[in-house]
């Protein structure tokens, strides 16, 4: 066989990079064992989960795997990430998760690296679940909102009990040396009622390799708590800056914070690691338990009709679904942003913020983020700190870093 005639070398590799999927969010179980009051799946506009099967059936998983493999081959992509998600994915049980990952891996072309992750509330994360994660190399992200007070403000059982004690037990297990390789990090939703430093310290107690700080979902028609879009106050920026200043001044830094690391990377001309910043094309596809294909999950916070692509893995390829406006079918890049964003001096970093946060009923997404004032202040603050550090490092004046 000639050197270039291996199966991988003969796959179609287009010269130009067409829009393609880098991450699939697989809704393996459609229900949850918590009833968090801010949940975008169960408490927002799109209530389609009520009519969907609880667990993704094997035939649906097989179809997803085949569709994904065909999509990767068509675009010459050699790496993709699948996130086992829900609801709560561990409610599906270890056997179902094991079968699911085996099916996905079996369908992948030999030259494709399949990274598998799981986003869980941690309540069912025990030794058996972690053994499965080690077997399949599944990286585990856990949702927790900080210390007990912060976490139990929203992350509660249906009967009102807080979930902190259970998630703390799971995180102590995950942080043990024998499991740490599978510890991806923590996902925390910001609440202005919580003290930012207490939240940060509470999260750091679990020794996470990385933190994600998420702004609560909202838009111009349903503003986030404490956010009044026409008010120049910047409570979310103030909250985040308190955490940034503490994190940034630590030496050595014991954990990464994706939002801040992305912001610094963008200021220095690099890439964002989050959809909340930057102007990258949408590359995340969500598959519901019935095989329905949707765009990014955060659009559930806008209106139900926005999410409905009308596509499913039984009748449609991933490339067909990608053309929908909730996926790569929508205009992207700075030229596609609202006029106010295009004229903004921090647009190269902000990118208009998370797509879902730009929504207004009757108008759509042709707006700056509902967090515009907060994003602007946060970006300027980080820019000033980084620029000052660069100047100090170089011992002379340097031009301000972008944008
Ligand atoms: S800070 Fe506001 S105006 Fe500037 S890019 Fe972001 S959302 Fe748009």
Image (spheres, rainbow, N blue to C red):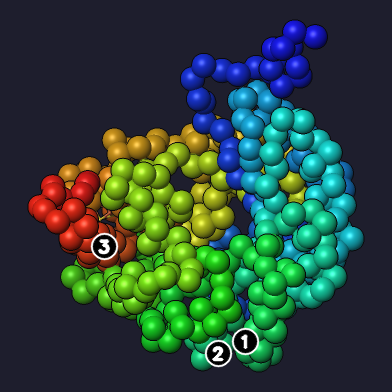
- The label number, if any, that marks residue 382 in the structure image: 3
* 186 left or right of 178 in image: left
> Is label 2 within 8 A of ligand 1 (CB to nearest ligand atom)?
no
Q: Nearer the viewer, residue 135 or 394?
A: 394
Q: Is residue 172 visible?
A: yes
Q: Of label 2 and label 3, which has the lower sequence position? A: 2
- Please report the residue visible at 75 percent of the width from the left and 8 percent of the height from the top: 2
Question: Which residue in the structure is indicated by mark 1?
Answer: 164
Distance of label 3 from label 1 (alpha carbons): 32 Å
Q: Nearer the viewer, mark 3 or mark 1?
A: 3
Q: CA distance from mark 2 to mark 1?
A: 6 Å
Residue at coordinates 17% horizontally, 44% vertically from top-left?
343
Q: Which residue is mark 2?
A: 148
Residue at (54, 36) in percent of width and height = 324
**Can you tell which of label 2 and label 3 is closer to the viewer?**
3
295 on left or right of 183: left
In the image, 170 versus 6, the foreground residue is 6
* Disc 3 element: helix
User: Where residue 378 sits: x, y (%)?
Assistant: 27, 65
Q: Is residue 234 left or right of residue 363?
A: left
Q: CA distance from mark 2 to mark 3?
A: 29 Å
């Amino acid at each position: 066989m000639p050197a270039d005639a291996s199966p991988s070398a003969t796959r179609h590799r287009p010269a130009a990079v067409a829009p393609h999927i880098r991450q699939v969010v697989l809704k393996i179980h459609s229900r949850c064992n918590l009833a968090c009051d801010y949940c975008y799946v169960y408490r927002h506009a799109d209530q389609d989960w009520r009519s969907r099967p609880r667990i993704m059936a094997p035939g649906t998983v097989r179809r997803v795997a085949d569709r994904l493999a065909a999509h990767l081959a068509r675009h010459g992509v050699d790496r993709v990430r699948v996130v086992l998600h829900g609801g709560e994915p561990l409610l599906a049980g270890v056997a179902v998760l094991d079968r699911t990952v085996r099916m996905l891996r079996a369908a992948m072309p030999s030259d494709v690296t399949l990274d598998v992750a799981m986003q869980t509330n941690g309540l069912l994360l025990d030794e058996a679940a972690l053994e499965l994660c080690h077997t399949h190399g599944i990286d585990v992200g856990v949702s927790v909102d900080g210390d007990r007070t912060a976490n139990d403000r929203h992350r509660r059982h249906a009967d009102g009990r807080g979930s902190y004690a259970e998630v703390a037990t799971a995180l102590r297990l995950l942080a043990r040396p024998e499991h740490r390789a599978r510890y991806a990090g923590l996902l925390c939703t910001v609440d202005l009622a919580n003290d930012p430093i207490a939240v940060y310290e509470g999260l750091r107690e679990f020794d996470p390799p990385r933190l994600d700080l998420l702004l609560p979902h909202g838009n111009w028609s349903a503003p986030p708590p404490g956010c009044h879009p026409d008010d120049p106050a910047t409570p979310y920026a103030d909250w985040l800056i308190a955490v940034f200043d503490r994190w940034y001044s630590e030496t050595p830094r014991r954990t990464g914070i994706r939002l801040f690391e992305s912001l610094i990377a963008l200021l220095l001309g690099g890439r964002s690691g989050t959809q909340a910043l930057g102007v990258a094309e949408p590359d995340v596809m969500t598959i519901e338990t019935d095989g329905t294909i949707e765009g990014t999950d955060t659009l559930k916070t806008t209106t139900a009709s926005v999410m409905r692509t009308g596509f499913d893995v039984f009748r449609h390829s991933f490339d067909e679904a990608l053309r929908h406006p909730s996926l790569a079918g929508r205009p992207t890049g700075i030229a596609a942003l609202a006029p106010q964003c295009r004229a903004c001096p921090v647009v190269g970093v902000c990118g208009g913020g998370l797509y879902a946060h730009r929504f207004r009923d009757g108008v759509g997404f042709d707006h700056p983020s509902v967090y515009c004032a907060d994003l602007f202040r946060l970006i300027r603050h980080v820019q000033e700190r980084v620029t000052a550090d660069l100047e100090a490092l170089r011992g002379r004046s340097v031009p301000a870093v972008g944008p």
